[in-house]
Amino acid sequence: MASGAFPPLLPKVDAILVLDGDGNRLAGKYYGDFMKNPSTTAAAAGDGADTTTDNAAAAQSVEQLRNSFEQQLQSKIGGIAAKPDAAEVVTVLGKTAVFCGGSPPGNNGGGGDVRVVHVGPAGESELVLAHLVEGMYEALSHLMGGSTDRAMVLDNLELVFLLIDEHCDGGIILETDGQKLAGSVLLRDEQEPAMGQGMEGQGGGGMPGQAPPMQSGGGMGGLGMGGGEMTIGQALMQARNQIMANLNQT
Amino acid sequence: MAEGDGLTMNNLISEVQGALDKFKLEDDATGANDYYSPYANLEKAAVLQEARCFHDPTAVRESPRKCCTVIAQLLHLTNTGQYMNSAEATEVFFGVTKLFMSDDASLRRMVYLFIKDVAETCNPDDVIIVTSSLTKDMTCDVDLYRANALRVLARIVDAAMLGAIERYVKQAVVDSSGQVSSAALVSATHLFEKNEESAAIVKRWISETTEATSSPNEMVQFHAMQLLYQIKKHDRLGMQKLVTQFSQRNTLRSPLALVLLVRYTAKLLTDEVSEGRQSGSFQTGTNFSRAGYAFLEASLRHKSEMVVYEAAKSICALPNIEPQELSPAVNVLQLFLSSPKPAVRFAAIKTVSQVAVNHPRIVSKCNEDLEALIADANRSIATLAITTLLKTGSENSVDRLLKQISVFLSEIPDEYKVTIVKSIQRLCLTYPAKHRVLVGFLSNFLREEGGFEFKRSIVNSIVSLMKQVPETTEGSLLHLCEFIEDCEFTMLSTQILHLLGELGPGTSAPARYIRFIYNRVILENSAVRAAAVGALSKFAARCPSLRSSILTLLKRSLDDEDDETRDRASVAVSVLKDAMEEFPYLAPPEDADPDEDPVPDVPQAGDPAAFVLLQGLPMSFDRLDRSIRAYVKAPAAMDSPDQLTLSTLPIVEEYEEPESAVDDGDDIGADAALAAAVSGKEKEKKEVVDPAAAVYAIPELAALGRVFRSSPPTALSEEEAEYVVTCVKHVLPEHIILQFPIQNTLEDQRLVNCTVTVEGDSECFEVAGEVAAESIKYGETVNAFTVISRNPDAPLAPCNFECVLNFGVIQVDPKSGEDESDPFEEEYPLEELEIATSDFMAKVSVPDFRSSWEIVGNSNEVLEKFALQFKKQEDAVSAVIDFLGMQPCDGTGHIKPGEGGKKPHMLHLSGVFVGGTNVLARAQVAAQGDASGVLLKIAVRSDDPDVSRMVADCIR
């Protein structure tokens, strides 16, 4: 039996990616040495100031590596739609990639076109990876208010970054439960549901129930509208910021 | 007042809402395409500009939202490949540290995230300044802050700082909040991998970690298990105890933690087998094997699919597993095959296909489920199902299977097709009777659309089938001929043309291939034309009856515009003309009796065309290349008056080929680029230094002549000894030069005038001289040499030599390196050195063992029979190779997996004995079944009866 087939004793994922329907990376994180050529690590470890150009060049090649990996990935997963509770599996460059989401071909622009992909070593159990990806996808759709289309995710990238961070730390999985994940991203503590109310003006913290953040498109993602806990001054300040922002765009 | 206030506020809010709705409406009206996202079309410079606001305390206090967005934008930049350079990163980083002033939770969260991201790219010295802020957060009472601060800290602390905050981390491990506890455990796992010092600190938290395994929080259990394994992984008994405890106590709730436990159990069981404590059935093995297997088996009934699958997979991967122990696992996998979840089906089919390699019978009960999977929407699953079926299917199901596949093949990517082609090739080997159908099937796909890799894999499969199943040859050649009629790949065309030239003339009707080949001469590019001309001339050389017609064809290529084609044509034409004059072809008379044996259409002895066009080199190009390199390296070789001929070239041993990974063909996605990278590395490895170079460097030794072969180094002392001595034996026609690399590991000594005295009791060996290593400083390795002369008249017999290292010691000051004393004499006994007959044998393979065996003939054959004390056939085979020091040929050096012990194994060996005598040996190794030993029958042939006898006597 090939040596790669033995499951890792210290399970780690190699990458977590959030890709849109065309395979563009909306957010994502690569862990460990995956898709990283050795020269990069050396340059990063060296003295920062001297290696500015090296860093840039190395970074460029890392980006190329990653892009080409994502292209290969997309060529395999494009056109497959995976239900939120039934992740699909493909293998790319000897890695196992498990994903949720996506839309079937011919359904362009429809909802749910974002894919959450977990990439793991070949020996990793597909079921474990599926468990992880399903957990994260659940949290994502919860955070995005049920519609995980490209625009929604792009508007709320901040939450996606936080989600990835709460889900996985340096390749080791931190939490897989979708509800708990969404809770920690929105700063709702599992044990102390009221804790968030202590912080003023935080995104979604004071919102009643499980309501997701704003559905609106224009730059409002995550803006706390819990008017009850705000002082008037803060409400005004936020409103002004928001209006200014909207004016600037249009 | 309160009422008024409320009113104003309500008014305000509704007004704001109204305004927002209006904007939103406008947005919607302008269309979905130009909606604005804070992350669309970001420019790095603009965001960096924005980031300046971090330095403004008012902005930080009053609009934390804005700061959050800017941080997210920065993260998005790095995410899309617009990396900051070091200067920019440092500046932003200092800005971000200012944000610790704000108490806003969301902002703090983003700050943590940013520091973690930047910690990888920033100068570590800069990052360290946030430690105090983080330490403060780590000790505060908000779980979220503590958990995150811990994780960030783990990224940036070094071992010394870790020591300072150890107390807090240790506490956090057993914190009541799952979030904090998990964060602490995961951070500890990262720290453990970071460096030795941190690992040493983490090891001290073992009792806290053990406590955490009984946490009610599932993830904490998982993380605690992981860390416990990290800490204990080199402690076999500790791990066994851990695994036994947890599998019996049944306290782990988390499926992920159980998955880990299953993996640890399987790892330990595998180690039990590989370290020889366990053999045979696991149920009757050691205590641990029994308990371990029982736990795996019990896990097959767990309620979580993850755990069940892990247990099934682990059982299937256990070494030497008995079929009855395997079948519960396969039953579970069979259920999984029809799961609605693709991941479950994929995992199950992957494992099943691996089991099918060694236990096709057990898997065959899943055949129905497998057939259902051929239509699976996930192509990887479908492909795996087919390849598995091809392994487990019976002979009569082949036709039905092929029909199903041919529908499927047209709609999948090439990569999967290649996998299937390989499986079909294997199937054809299992059922040679089906070759016509299978080869026909393969060649159908040659005609369809497909990329180079796909076509090449088919051609390779067909070609290797021709070698292994000779009946396929004629049919396959015609298929290939048709393929090159319309083949866009030059490489494949040339390969096939060459093959036609080799095999075509030997078939029943060689003439029918000529048309296909000549078409290539007319229609193709220069490389293919040259190959076609080459093939034509081979036909002419091998079949005198075709010569005159081929000569006409070849003459047309004499004015080809391509040099190579023209050269080949003119050589062939001139040689053929001579040959036809010398040996004119006599057609058999028209009225010859058809019942009579036809005159064989072969060239007569001495035919020049046959010699020039058909005789290959007596050695491979690879070997020629190595021999010439070795020739040039030997001193004075270039000035030698002797003529350089193939037979006077030095013998160069084969390199140990790195055992190529068994390519079972099922690794979907096995990627060509990776494989190329690996083979590239192997090539680099092959550039080894000639071991004899050290000998040639010393003029006295170089004068003794060319080194025939050099043995790999053998150790004469312990590796940890004060003076580490190894020995390399260089064999020359009449001498043996012993090279002793001596390493001085003592810091306060310098060794001078080192020699190794060897003493042996033998008629044929006599010590002739020594070359001392003059001075060896601390840490250096210097060579000493001892020359032994061999009496060529006395028969070679193995001989042991006592070795003693003689040297002078000078005490030195380790700091300054200056000598502190005069040398005093010392002796240091070394282990015995053996010179065996096999040292005089160079491992050289022959291209075609069978024909060489026949050519040498049995006039000097020595036959012997031995009973060897080996338990396993494999061991006996490798020992025989070792005894004789010869090169195994035709891949007989290893017993095919799965055949061990059942049949007698035939070993083909070849080598060159000192003096240049070619030696061939056939050895039959048969296990006697009752494990009482192994029976060896060996036949040795060479041109010299004494050599044959000596070689046969090598067996002990």
Image (cartoon, coloured by chain):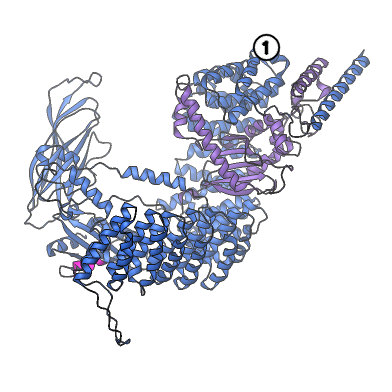
Chain colours: A purple, B blue
The part of the image, by quadrant, that contains residue B53 is top right
Q: Is residue B603 above or below residue B295?
A: below
Could you tell me residue B50's position as x and y percent?
65, 18
Q: Residues within 10 Å of mark 1 (few under 14, many from 20)?
A: few
Q: Which of the chains bears the disc numbered 1?
A: B
Q: Is residue B598 above or below residue B248?
A: below
Identify the image quadrant of residue A158: top right
Q: Of B477 and A24, which appears nearest the observer?
A: B477
Residue A163, given in percent of the width and then of the height, sits at 66, 33
Instruction: Judge whether residue B852 is colored magenta.
Output: yes
Residue B867 at least partly seen: no
Q: Is residue B160 magenta?
A: no
Image point 40% across, 66% down: which residue?
Answer: B466
**Residue located at (90% from left, 18% from top):** B6
User: Where does label 1 land, which residue?
Assistant: B57
Q: Position of residue A187 (x, y in %)?
A: 71, 28
Q: Is residue B916 depicted above or below B55 in this figure?
A: below
Asked if B314 appears above or below B223 in the picture, the reply is below
Percent position of residue B602, x then y: 26, 73
B694 displayed left or right of B596: left
Most common secondary structure along the magenta stretch: helix
Residues in magenta, as a range? B851-860
Q: Quadrant of the C terminus of chain B?
A: bottom left
